[in-house]
Amino acid sequence: MATFLYRVGRLAFRRRWYVALVWAAVLAAVGLGALKAPGAADEGFSMPGIESQKAFDLMEQRFPGATADGATARVVFVAPNGQKVTAADHRKAVEDTVADLADGSQVASAVNPFQAKAVSKDGTTAYATVTYKVAADDLTDASKEQLEHALEEARDTGLTVDAGGSAMADGGGAGGTAELIGVAIAAVVLLVTFGSLAAAGLPLLTALIGVGVSMATILALADALGLSTTTGTLAMMLGLAVGIDYALFVVSRYREERANGRAPQEATALAVGTAGSAVVFAGLTVVIALAGLAVVGIPMLTKMGLAAAGAVVVAVLIALTLVPAFLGFWPNAVLRRRDRRPGRTEEEAKDNGGTRWARFVLRRPLPVLILGVVGLGALALPMTSLQLGMPGDEAKPTSTTERRAYDALAEGFGPGFNGPLTVVVDAQGDDDAQAAAAAISKDIGATKGVVSVSPARFNEAGDTAVFSVVPSTAPTDEKTKDLVTAIRGERPGIESETGATYEVTGTTALNIDISEKVQSALVPYLIVVVGLAIVLLLVVFRSLLVPLKAALGFLLSVLASLGAVVVVFQEGHGAGLLGVETTGPIMSLMPIFLVGIVFGLAMDYEVFLLSRMREAYVHGETSHQAVTSGFRHSARVVVAAALIMIAVFAGFIGESDSMIKMIGFGLASAVLLDAFVVRMAIVPAVLALLGDKAWWLPKWLDRILPRVDVEGEALTRGADTPEPAPADQEAARV
């Protein structure tokens, strides 16, 4: 591996113009494809294998066209204090607004609340449902402006008017502010780390090129593969973070080789052969973790994982080809001024912060290990009260009209009104479908926790009925989950009495089913991903204990980060500092996101840090000396890489979308804990306690495992005293 990558780096340096032109052509091609590609079709959210999805599919089959995924808006009217919305003047204002809403070219229907009996018992609140002919993503600006204009005119009459529903969505996805914040902080970290504008700018430039290629490819293939804006958000997050980090490690190793007296071309080739090997295996662990999301069985999650894995692959290729090509263009610009003088060697910088920290841990490994494990364990404790769900309008800021509409409906009609259950009765084999549906409706209506049941609506064939059930509790309340379980638990008895069957669906039931599926898939996912990564690390480090230690350290950091998410987003401690106005259940997919993404990133630091220790150990240093050498060469760069990751992820905390905010906080917390507590403290402490046993591998296993030479032993033997080639001498003058 190291020898092959050495040749790749050397070739990219010598043929830098060709490499740069190839990447420019790729970027232009995918960019043009993205501009010409049609927008992604809104296929909606699907979750095969759960009852809610089966019920929805049955509705699609038995009620063709009736469940089309058209956008909806629920407009809520609240009368001033002490007044009723049924008063003549308020009623006229509501009816005029509904008439205005129905006049849109994309509007299918707008239901008058007084005709639909959509008025609260106390007469203070009413709502009108507006249904559109097209999906939310296809609404024109004119349709959205018409909706906003109608709301403003209604407010001028003295009514409090707000609206929720898919028609109010702003398109989702992260905006440009988050990325700009992350890039700005990354630039500062790189400048401090390298002390050179060129060295700081090169990783940023190559990372942005990689993200451009990845995002343009996603947009170009969005329609064909059914990708969405959310899919690109994850790819952008990871592509930017790992793109900067991977280039950072190659540039750092290049500067080190130049400090050891290597000529530019040889230093570039050695940097790609050694640090590039670590980049390849670190990238592989991230790809394994992301591609492993397919194990969960959620199509949207699978697409997000594969798209992000593609962005990581692009980042690896950029680091192995475009970075050495740019080093060929500016071989001296990436060095500090004092490092450009002849005769500068690494011996001048034997001691640095990394070596001092390593010696501190090596002198007292047991206290450091205990403190690190206990601290992470304490942070992980809140995870025992983790509640999963899918945040909706209730999680949005009170400044949004969607949140105000949600609160008004809850106050006027009850908390369960925002999350009604939909029951689909399949009476295809029953002689009297109407009687069966009536019996099922009556039994469900008598269930404790049910406020009301709507009249059943039958399809044209008369063999399928649909009715709504309004719970007494909010959609994210644990009692609502118990109610869904109770209704489904009554099914065998009702089926035996009526001969018909039924299934429960709706947004609330769907969220409950998603949470249960994610929880059941978490352990198999962990086994697959961690198992494959352990095998990969076993090949890289040729050690039994190092991969196991890496996996256990990851579990500590991910559990601690989940605990931090629970503390802020569920329990509300410090939520106001992050702009979180409403706490509640944690997003159902959050544990899977953290496990998948953070595992890959954690293995990044493991590979980069341990590869230098392994390299020193293979070259004859003792186990303790190898730890010190690894920290001397890698600690500063690993810290910089972690800070960049944290900056990129933390930038997304400022987004208004609660899901993106939560993901950004969780990932930033996980990287912080994994890099600075696990990799920088627990790892050297464990290696100090294990000594030479850390690198032990049974002889029979040593013979079986392939040799990848990630530490570059073959390169070191063949390049101890390199002579500058003519191309090197020419490049050195640049």
Image: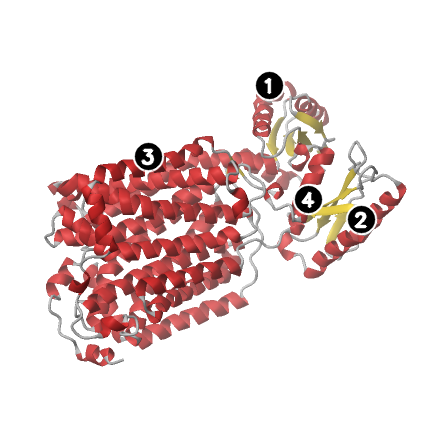
Q: Bin the neighbour count of mark 3 within 10 Å (Cα to Cα): few under 14, some 14-19, many 20 and up.
A: few
The kind of residue tagged 4 is Arg
Q: Give the residue at mark 4.
A: 404
Considering depth in this image, is 7 or 473 the residue closer to the camera? 473
Q: Nearer the viewer, residue 633 or 118?
A: 633
Q: Position of residue 3 (x, y in %)?
A: 19, 62
Mark identifier at residue 420: none
User: Within 10 angstroms of label 2, few (less than 14), some, or many (20 or more) residues?
Assistant: many
Place of residue 525 in the rendered image (x, y in percent of width and height, measured from the top left): 38, 39
Please report whichever mark, 3 or 2, sits nearer to the chain's N-terminal start: 2
Residue hosting label 2: 98
Can residue 309 be seen here? The reply is: no
Q: CA distance from mark 2 to mark 4?
A: 19 Å
Question: Which residue does the image show at 35% across and 68% down from the upper left?
Answer: 202
Q: Please tell me the numbered disc located at residue 493.
A: 1
Measured in 3D between alpha carbons, the distance from the residue under mark 3 to the one under mark 2, in whole angstroms, is: 60 Å
Vertical arrangement, residue 237 with respect to residue 372, above or below? below
Which residue, as the protein is rendered here, is positioned at the far right? 88
Q: Which residue is mark 3?
A: 374
Q: Foreground: 599 or 8?
A: 599
Looking at the image, is mark 1 or mark 4 earlier in the sequence? 4
Q: CA distance from mark 1 to mark 4?
A: 41 Å
Find residue 92 and report its horizontal and vertical position in percent.
87, 46
Type of colouring: secondary structure
